[in-house]
């Protein structure tokens, strides 16, 4: 019974909260008219950021602002990480990060990936955690929300996509900060530590001295989950008893993972005035998500193959799981964290049954099942455009999306975005599977070893950040390659769709008639689902067959 | 298009009169040769998908040759792969060549019409002195004289004379047409023949740029440029090709991880199977065949772009006369004045119309005969004096001694009656009003001072036109009737015909403004026109079909010419445009969906040795790895010629809403595309095993 209740509780709560949050986010991000309270808030933002935060921007300027801001953040964090020994809030006297690791970490947090080739409690000072990483967890998530807001405005037909700095401020202060505060308070109430004191030193019953790492965990965790960041305060991430102490913190964390990506879809629907279309997109995402959760839960309910023939009574695969969260909490989280590009873990993905391991990978390959904050919907848009183009022709008209014609320029841009993601995963895997860069860092031989490589590149390209673990990934080749992939995998799929939207918004709207290809019907949902699954399958079927599927078949 | 005069029959309104059998041996054999010549890599590069396939075939051939030279194992398998890869490319070329050959067959018969005739060029316009020059030397502005029995040497405009002209070489219509100077029937086309009288024509085309030349070029595909949607699709296909190129190249190092070395022919086979060769091979043929289907309907498009735009049209402007109504008003009812017998009215009306040669007049005679069996009389004996209709009197009729019978519009007849101290009865006023409001034309008949009653002249809406408009509405196309009638009449006819909107008292300016207004709202507008005053509107419309009987100016302004001059055909033009897009979409979907099965055939085959557990994924139970890969390659090649008929005929278009169309096509080409290759590959594998090749 509990097996069903856990995912049902998490998913139902997320869906129920997403609707009002979507409404709120629309008010926060794209106000129809300035309310009195809003106006004074906007004035404060303009006062801080100067007049450049006022003017609405064309898609090119919008992207340029986004890139320059992110570059600035990247450089800032790199500097903090390499000089943290001289900075305050360093009670443990942590030393600087090695340059390639600092590059990887800066790239990772700028790109909202939070792939961690380090262990927070071992390598980072509180200053680095709070003012470099946690700061980025806010603004990188805000960048995603800003981007999807701009995209929605474009699809609503405005050639001016808004102002990046204004959107960033709104997303950070009106959406993320309040939500994170609520979540952090709840987490503290449920027993999560929140302190700036150094590690606790305790004497155990045997008389040994034990050093227990702690810190401002609750604040960090709240934004880590809400912003689909996923970077843990501690190395073991949300499996750590301080980062995820109880059943209820686990439920709350899992809801936080799903919440904003779900709400974004409704915000998009409200800004574009196409709630039905948004509903179809939400439905497609939810269907895929539910399938993934169901499959993962079922597959994990099988005992691990290693116990075959051993006199061990085990009802399910318990390896790498935290029992305090409940039986299906691991599978539900594994799917949630990879479907959205969160990347935090509450169980070791490396220990999942092989076919279960395929589901987190598939989530990252598709990267559209709710996806990262803001960017998940942007990724889905690429599939929407592709589906509209192919299926649109089948109704005998030049394909149209939301009344605007999809032509050569849009398809070129869509293909760039569509190509980039698999290129990083396939290319990276190919290089690392064939060279010592990859093969010497593996923890396992054969298909499972290949899965480790595939997973790492998928995680980087999808800006997910979770790890299959087992991989010795803190090497220069891994740090540099995944660092680059995270940055490219972050910004190409944001810029190309914004360019598409800019180009679409510049076109004349075609009135909708009975001959128009409709995107707000169940039929379109089926088409879109087909496009996502078939394109996904064509790109990644070889990897799936050679990695998890071959492994599953070999241990039967 | 049907060019053979003896067999042609233009059935007006019927979209495609006669489907030429798809292939004839005379067409196929040269196409086979042509397909070989098209292996030229320079021309292949236009089509990125097939270009990659050709490169792959070449690479495989090299590997095969070296394998045979070194006598290594598996060279037979390599050879089979090479052969089938080349066949794949050849099939693609063949599809294009066949489509072109069909066009060329049409062009050849057109060209016959353009034998170099001798033109009589007018040297001195005053004396009409002529000199003989070859038609090819005529240039824009020359005057030529053409007599009965001679062929018109170039496109031009009649500036003097009236003649009947046989235009069957162009239109396939054997009935001669009248061409005369001035007005809307002044354009003549080079290659047509003057049957009677003689004409003086001003040449309006430069040599080599005549209408006929352009038609031939269009049909042959020589001037074929990719349409916008075709360009976009080519880009998408190139993108897919790139994606699969990436998948296949990365597979090689990943296989090395399992200590598997994939041989080049197998890798190329996988690549060619995955890239969308099916649609890549048929894309050009679809475009060429779309144009050909239009010309079968006797419509010449000046560009493929126009055909494609026709599919997007969502507003049709249709002239009332000739398109929606039968062109002429007809008498349908006699409404007598109080105290007058209907028969008496009919009799008078017939008498007044006996000399009236207009269709309206004749219809009155006919109606009187039908309803009361009143025959036409020899009126000469009664010293009848006919009064013809003039712009001043606006009445016509007959005088029989003292008896003056008149018919005309209500206001003039009222004046006629009142001048003779007669009375205009209220009942007649009421009848006149009712008829006008119902969209009819009332004609009042009077005998001296007495009003006899009203004749109801009615615009007859063509049979079946209402159903077509309902169809169009389902397709999401709005119909707008253009008419010179007053708004009241127009509204009544619009309601009867079931059009969505109308433009009454239309002037050329009003038409142009209407089109602009629709375009501002984002609509794509199609219209037909023939007169010179239609030219601005034709130029503004997105799809403009000029009637071949129309003026040169109208033809220049339009982007299509309807050789049958049948305005209803606009609807068929739209269907052809839609069909072309649908065929592309359907075959692309089919092509992409096919890939799933090919993966299941090839990937287990490649890795079977290193990862024997993958045998489970060989869900088709293909005999051996080699037979599996070969079967996939053969299926991929053979499906191209199998789909040539679909590409050339086009996916069937039905006038239903977008959702219904999509559902049907998805089911056939999407789901079918997923399932068919599983069956096909398995069958081919069985055959290979059967003949002992596996």
Image (spheres, rainbow, N blue to C red):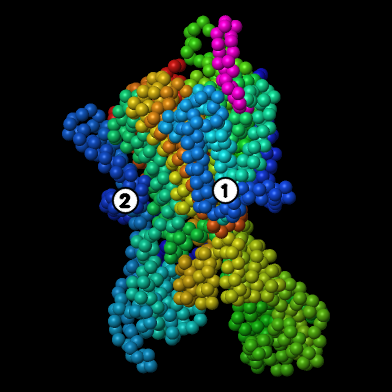
User: Along the line of sight, which residue is nearer the eye, B101 or B584?
Assistant: B584
**Which quadrant of the figure contains the C terminus of chain A?**
top left
Q: Is residue A171 above or below residue A309?
A: below
Q: Which mark is residue A164?
A: 1
Q: Position of residue A277 (x, y in %)?
A: 62, 45
B459 horizontally vs A553: left or right: right
Instruction: Classify 10 Å Cα crowding around label 1: few (below 14), some (14-19), many (20 and above).
Output: many
Res B483 quadrant in image: bottom right
Residue pictured at 39% horizontal, 30% vertical: A476
Residue B628 in view in this figure: no
Q: Is residue A3 magenta?
A: no
Q: Which residue is mark 2?
A: B44
**Which quadrant of the figure contains the N terminus of chain A?**
top right
Which stretch did the figure color magenta? Answer: A196-218
Q: Position of residue B587 (x, y in %)?
A: 45, 46
Q: Position of residue A548 (x, y in %)?
A: 45, 24
Nearest to viewer (mark 1 / mark 2): 1
């Amino acid at each position: 019974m509990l097996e069903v209740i856990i995912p049902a509780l998490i998913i139902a709560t997320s869906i129920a909260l997403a609707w009002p949050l979507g409404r709120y986010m629309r008010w926060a991000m794209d106000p129809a008219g300035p309310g009195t309270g809003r106006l004074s808030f906007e004035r404060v933002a303009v006062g801080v950021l100067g007049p450049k935060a006022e003017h609405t921007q064309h898609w090119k300027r919008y992207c340029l602002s986004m890139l320059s801001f992110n570059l600035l953040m990247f450089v800032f964090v790199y500097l903090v990480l390499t000089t943290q020994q001289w900075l305050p809030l360093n009670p443990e006297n942590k030393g600087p990060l090695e340059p390639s690791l600092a590059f990887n970490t800066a790239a990772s947090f700028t790109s909202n990936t939070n792939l961690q080739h380090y262990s927070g409690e071992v390598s980072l000072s509180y200053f680095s955690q709070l003012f470099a990483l946690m700061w980025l967890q806010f603004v990188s998530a805000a960048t995603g929300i800003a981007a999807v807001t701009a995209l929605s405005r474009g699809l609503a037909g405005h050639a001016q996509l808004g102002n990046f700095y204004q959107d960033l401020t709104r997303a950070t202060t009106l959406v993320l900060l309040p939500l994170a505060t609520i979540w952090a308070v709840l987490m503290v109430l449920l027993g999560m530590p929140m302190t700036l004191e150094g590690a606790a030193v305790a004497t155990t019953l045997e008389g040994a001295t034990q050093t227990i790492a702690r810190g401002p965990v609750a604040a960090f965790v709240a934004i880590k989950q809400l912003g689909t960041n996923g970077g843990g305060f501690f190395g073991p991430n949300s499996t750590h008893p301080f980062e995820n102490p109880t059943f209820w913190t686990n439920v709350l964390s899992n809801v936080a993972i799903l919440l904003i990506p779900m709400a974004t879809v409704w915000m998009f629907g409200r800004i574009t005035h196409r709630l039905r279309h948004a509903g179809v997109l939400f439905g497609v995402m939810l269907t895929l998500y539910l399938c993934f959760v169901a499959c993962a839960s079922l597959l994990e309910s099988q005992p691990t193959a290693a116990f075959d023939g051993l006199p061990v009574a085990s009802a399910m695969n318990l390896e790498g799981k935290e029992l305090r969260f409940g039986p299906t909490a691991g599978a539900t989280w594994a799917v949630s964290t990879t479907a959205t590009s969160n990347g935090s873990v509450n169980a070791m993905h490396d220990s999942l049954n092989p076919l279960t391991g395929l589901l987190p990978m598939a989530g990252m390959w598709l990267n559209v099942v709710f996806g990262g904050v803001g960017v998940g919907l942007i990724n889905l848009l690429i599939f929407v455009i592709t589906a509209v183009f192919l299926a649109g022709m089948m109704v005998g008209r030049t394909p149209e999306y939301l009344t605007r014609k999809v032509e050569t320029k849009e398809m070129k841009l869509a293909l760039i975005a569509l190509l980039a993601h698999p290129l990083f995963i396939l290319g990276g895997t190919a290089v690392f599977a064939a060279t010592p860069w990859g093969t010497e860092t593996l923890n396992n031989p054969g298909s499972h070893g290949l899965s480790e490589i595939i997973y790492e590149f998928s995680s980087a390209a999808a800006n997910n950040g979770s790890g299959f673990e087992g991989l010795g990934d803190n090497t220069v080749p891994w740090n540099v390659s995944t660092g680059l992939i995270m940055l490219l995998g972050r910004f190409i799929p944001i810029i190309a769709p914004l360019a598409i939207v800019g180009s679409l918004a510049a076109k004349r709207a075609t009135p909708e008639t009975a001959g128009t290809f409709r995107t707000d019907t169940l039929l379109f949902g089926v088409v879109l689902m087909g496009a996502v699954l078939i394109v996904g399958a064509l790109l990644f079927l070889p990897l799936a067959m050679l990695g998890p599927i071959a492994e599953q078949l070999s241990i039967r | 298009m049907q060019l053979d005069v003896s067999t042609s029959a233009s059935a007006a309104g019927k979209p495609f009169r006669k489907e030429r059998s798809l292939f004839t041996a005379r067409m196929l054999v040269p196409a086979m040769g042509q397909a070989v010549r098209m292996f030229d890599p320079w021309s292949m590069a236009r089509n990125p998908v097939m270009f990659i396939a050709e490169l792959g075939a070449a690479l495989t051939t090299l590997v095969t040759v070296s394998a045979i030279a070194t006598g290594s194992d598996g060279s037979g398998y390599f050879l089979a792969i090479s052969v089938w890869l080349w066949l794949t490319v050849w099939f693609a070329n063949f599809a294009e060549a066949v489509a072109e050959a069909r066009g060329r067959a049409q062009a050849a018969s057109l060209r016959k019409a353009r034998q170099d005739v001798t033109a009589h060029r007018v040297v001195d316009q005053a004396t009409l002195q002529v000199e003989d020059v070859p038609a090819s030397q005529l240039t824009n502005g020359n005057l030529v004289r053409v007599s009965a029995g001679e062929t018109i040497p170039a496109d031009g405009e009649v500036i003097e004379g009236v003649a009947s002209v046989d235009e069957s070489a162009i239109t396939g219509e054997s009935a001669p047409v009248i061409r005369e100077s001035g007005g809307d029937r002044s354009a003549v086309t080079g290659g047509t023949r003057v049957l009677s009288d003689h004409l003086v024509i001003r040449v309006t085309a430069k040599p080599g740029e005549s209408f006929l030349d352009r038609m031939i070029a269009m049909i042959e595909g020589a001037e074929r440029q990719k349409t916008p949607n075709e360009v976009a699709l080519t880009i998408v296909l190139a993108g897919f090709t790139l994606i699969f190129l990436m998948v296949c190249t990365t597979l090689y190092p990943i296989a090395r991880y399992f200590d598997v070395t994939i041989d080049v022919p197998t890798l190329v086979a996988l690549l060619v199977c995955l890239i969308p060769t099916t649609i890549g091979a048929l894309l050009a043929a679809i475009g060429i065949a779309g144009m050909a289907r239009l010309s079968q309907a006797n419509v010449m498009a000046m560009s493929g772009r126009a055909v494609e735009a026709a599919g997007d049209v969502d507003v049709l402007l249709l002239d009332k006369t000739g398109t929606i109504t039968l062109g002429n008003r007809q008498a349908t009812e006699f409404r007598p004045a109080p105290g007058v017998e209907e028969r008496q009215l009919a009799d008078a009306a017939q008498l007044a119309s006996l000399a009236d040669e207009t269709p309206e007049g004749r219809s009155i005679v006919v109606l009187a005969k039908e309803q009361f069996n009143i025959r036409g009389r020899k009126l000469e004996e009664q010293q009848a004096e006919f009064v013809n209709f003039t712009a001043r009197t606006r009445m016509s009729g007959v005088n029989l001694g003292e008896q003056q019978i008149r018919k005309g519009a209500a206001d003039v007849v009222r004046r006629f009656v009142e001048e003779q101290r007669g009375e205009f009865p209220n009942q007649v006023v009421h009848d006149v009003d009712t008829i006008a409001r119902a969209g009819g034309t009332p004609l009042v008949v009077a005998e001296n001072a007495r009003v006899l009653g009203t004749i109801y002249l009615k615009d007859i809406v063509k049979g079946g036109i209402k159903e077509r408009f309902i169809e169009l509405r389902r397709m999401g196309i709005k119909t707008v009737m253009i008419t010179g009638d007053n708004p009241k009449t127009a509204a009544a006819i619009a309601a009867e015909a079931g059009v969505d909107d109308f433009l009454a008292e239309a002037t050329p300016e009003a038409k142009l403004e209407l089109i602009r207004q629709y375009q501002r709202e984002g609509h794509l507008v199609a219209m037909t026109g023939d007169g010179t005053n239609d030219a601005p509107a034709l130029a503004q419309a997105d799809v403009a079909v000029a009637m071949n009987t129309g003026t040169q100016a109208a033809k220049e302004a339009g982007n299509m010419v309807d050789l049958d001059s049948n305005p209803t055909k606009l609807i068929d033009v739209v269907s052809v445009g839609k069909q072309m897009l649908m065929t592309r979409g359907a075959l692309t979907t089919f092509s992409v969906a096919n890939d799933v099965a090919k993966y299941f055939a090839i990937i287990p085959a490649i890795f079977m040795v290193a990862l024997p557990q993958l045998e489970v994924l060989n869900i088709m139970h293909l005999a051996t790895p080699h037979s599996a890969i070969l079967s996939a390659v053969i299926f991929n090649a053979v499906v191209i010629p199998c789909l040539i008929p679909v590409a050339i005929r086009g996916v069937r278009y039905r006038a239903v809403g977008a959702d219904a169309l999509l559902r049907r096509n998805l089911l056939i080409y999407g789901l079918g595309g997923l399932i068919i290759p599983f069956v096909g590959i398995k069958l081919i594998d069985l055959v290979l095993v059967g003949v002992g090749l596996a």
